């Protein structure tokens, strides 16, 4: 099994697949991110299913993307020659992505093997397993080629080299000489539909269309700073995690990649967390991508419609609310990390910080002249009313603990942000509302946080009112304007986090051996937290330290420029779902923060002036 960092991402803004450096598609859910997998060897090499194209004999290999594109190339080198494998999820008509009518009747994976030198013997092994590996399909010949069908799912494989049905799969061997190509197209569709699959002859056209879509999109990036390549790659990943038919954004395209190898911290991230989505919105908006922002606002208005008491912290990509968490016992898990989960029980949690993130996102949208529908203000008013009524309550917090609710300081601060942005909407954009009441509640929240969230004996802010532990989420306090970064209380908090949460120079979220979260202790360094530290160091004028840490973090990226959720400095491995929106958002934000600090005094997130006394 390949390491997490050995995979490349391909996507079409409807789903996404992971391709190993050995030429195997080991993860792909069709026709959308949260559908059951048809290739799932990532979670079980024997039962999950895969599609491999590679040399038959020993080879070396490495990945790269085509410039600023999501078209992936894998270079195989053998004693007899070299072959380039080109992979993508096909974008049939790029213009359709702006206002799509819904799910397309077919989704296609395009793979082209091109011999660059010499002569190389190659093999193709096509072994899909539907419904997360639980269904071994029936393989048959059709008038178009070969087909795998099982229950509601069908995959048609068309190739311009000879392949045949063997041992519950489709296999073929072929030889390529310099200048020759072998083309493959696998087309997914519902098995009861009479769909004409794409032919192998269309492979080149799809590669060209897909490449053009991604490169044209990347050209719109307004960032021109020192780390432009890294910023564009991260923005491309964020775009690839967007579900274009609705505007929803998934946190990651995978499920159950472990935060501890062999452990139980394995979660399904193929849903739209409002927090993650608002962070994504901020990053895209900051760099000129307004269309995605408008589509996300429309998604939110649909998903959140109804009583604010029923508001959720996450939804499916189409706005569905029920996301029951199930375990799949027939899968062995990535490197034995069980259970494998689908769905996510955190959907029912109370996480007060989400309301602040949403209000902040709407505020940013107005500041950058995004067309926010009039009815969005009614939703915001309802959210503010909810925060006013519930901010005193404990919650599960940003890290979604399963040990019970607490008075998390970060959650209280983000409740403050919700009220603060409501006041700003009234003062700066003439939005109607009881401003005096909002100011009163905002000030009350702030006074309580300073009284109960700051520990005078320890000399820094703490994780919750009920415990003296540190938490990296406290780094958000100056970034959202709650307190100046150079306030002595915040300076001491930053210093304490640097000292006590450091894992080989990277930051843990919190000490899982001391702060109970309802799970066995142990996890990697959380990459977004380390990027938050970069932002804080820039805010307090430690620009050299900020840039050194940023460069250290960038060195952790894969050869394709991708980041997982966490990193294990001890074993030098990526951990958690991959690639992770949180991490790539942080790359974009920190690059911007450092660029600002190189030219002027750094400002907090979104360019807002600092607040606080």
Image (cartoon, grey):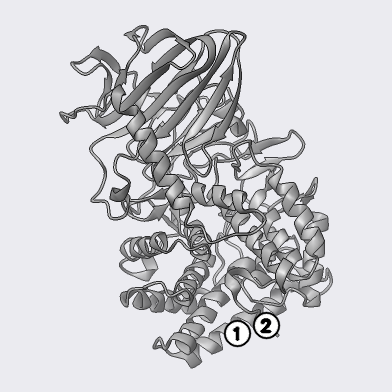
Q: Is residue 335 left or right of residue 515?
A: left
- Which is nearer the eye, 227 or 41? 227
Q: Is residue 471 visible?
A: no
Question: Label for residue 612?
Answer: 2
For mark 1, give the secondary structure: helix
Q: Is residue 520 above or below residue 228?
A: above
Number of numbered discs overlaid on the protein picture: 2
Q: In the picture provided, is 553 more to the left or to the right than 31?
A: right
Q: Residue furthest bottom?
A: 436
Residue sitting at 18 percent across and 16 percent down?
A: 143
> Position of 264 compared to 460: left or right?
left
Residues packed near mark 1 inside 10 Å, few (<14), some (14 to 19) or many (20 plus): few
Q: Secondary structure at mark 2?
A: loop
**Residue farthest toward the left in the current orientation of the protein:** 194
Disc 1 target residue: 444
* Residue occupying the point 48% across, 87% down: 428
């Amino acid at each position: 099994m390949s390491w997490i960092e050995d995979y490349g991402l391909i996507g079409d803004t409807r789903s996404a697949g992971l391709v190993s450096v050995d030429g195997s598609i080991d993860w792909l859910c069709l026709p959308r991110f949260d559908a059951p997998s048809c290739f799932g060897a990532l979670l079980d090499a024997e039962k999950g299913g895969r599609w491999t194209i590679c040399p038959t004999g020993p080879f070396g290999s490495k990945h790269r993307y085509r410039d600023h594109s999501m078209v992936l190339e894998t270079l195989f080198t053998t004693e007899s020659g070299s072959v380039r494998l080109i992979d993508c999820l096909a974008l049939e008509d790029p213009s359709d992505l702006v206002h799509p009518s819904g799910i397309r009747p077919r989704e296609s994976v395009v793979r082209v093997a091109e011999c660059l030198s010499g002569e190389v013997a190659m093999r193709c092994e096509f072994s899909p397993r539907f419904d997360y590996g639980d269904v071994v399909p029936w393989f048959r010949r059709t008038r178009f080629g070969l087909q795998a069908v099982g229950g509601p799912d069908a995959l048609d494989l068309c190739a311009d080299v000879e392949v045949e049905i063997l041992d519950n799969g489709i296999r073929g061997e072929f030889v390529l000489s310099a200048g020759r190509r072998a083309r493959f197209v696998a087309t997914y569709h519902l098995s009861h539909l009479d769909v004409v699959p794409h032919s192998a002859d269309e492979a080149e056209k799809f590669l060209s269309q897909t490449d053009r879509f991604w490169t044209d999109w990347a050209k719109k990036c307004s960032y021109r700073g020192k780390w432009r390549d890294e910023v564009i790659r991260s923005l491309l990943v964020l775009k690839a995690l967007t579900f274009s038919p609705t505007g929803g954004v998934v946190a990651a395209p995978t499920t159950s990649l472990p935060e501890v190898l062999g452990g139980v911290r394995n979660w399904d991230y193929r849903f739209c967390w409002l927090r993650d989505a608002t962070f994504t919105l901020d990053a895209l908006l900051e760099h000129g991508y307004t269309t995605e922002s408008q589509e996300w606002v429309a998604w939110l208005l649909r998903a959140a419609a109804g009583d604010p008491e029923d508001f959720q912290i996450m939804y499916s990509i189409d706005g569905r609310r029920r996301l029951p968490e199930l375990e799949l016992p027939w899968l062995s898990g990535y490197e034995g990390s069980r259970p494998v989960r689908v769905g996510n029980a955190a959907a029912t949690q109370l996480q007060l910080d989400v309301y602040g993130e949403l209000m902040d996102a709407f505020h940013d949208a107005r500041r950058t002249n995004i067309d926010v529908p009039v009815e969005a203000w009614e939703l915001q008013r309802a959210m503010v009313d909810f925060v006013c009524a519930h901010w005193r309550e404990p919650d599960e917090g940003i890290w979604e603990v399963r040990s019970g609710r607490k008075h998390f300081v970060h959650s209280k601060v983000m409740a403050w942000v919700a009220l603060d942005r409501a006041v700003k909407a009234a003062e700066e954009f003439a939005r109607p509302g009881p401003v005096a009441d909002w100011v009163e509640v905002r000030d009350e929240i702030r006074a309580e946080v300073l009284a109960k969230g700051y520990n005078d004996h320890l000399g820094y802010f703490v994780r919750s009112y009920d415990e003296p532990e540190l938490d990296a989420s406290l780094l958000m306090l100056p970034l959202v304007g709650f307190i100046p970064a150079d306030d002595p209380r915040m300076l001491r908090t930053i210093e304490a986090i640097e000292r006590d949460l450091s894992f080989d120079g990277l930051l843990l979220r919190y000490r899982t051996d001391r702060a109970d979260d309802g799970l066995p202790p142990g996890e990697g360094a959380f990459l977004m937290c380390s990027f938050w530290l970069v932002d804080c160091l820039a805010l307090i004028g430690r620009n050299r330290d900020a840039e050194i840490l940023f460069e250290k973090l960038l060195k952790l990226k894969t050869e394709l420029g991708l980041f997982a959720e966490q990193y294990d400095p001890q074993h030098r491995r990526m951990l958690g779902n991959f690639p992770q929106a949180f991490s790539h958002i942080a790359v974009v934000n920190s690059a911007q923060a450092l660029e600002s600090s190189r030219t002027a005094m750094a400002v907090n997130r979104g360019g807002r002036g600092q607040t606080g006394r």
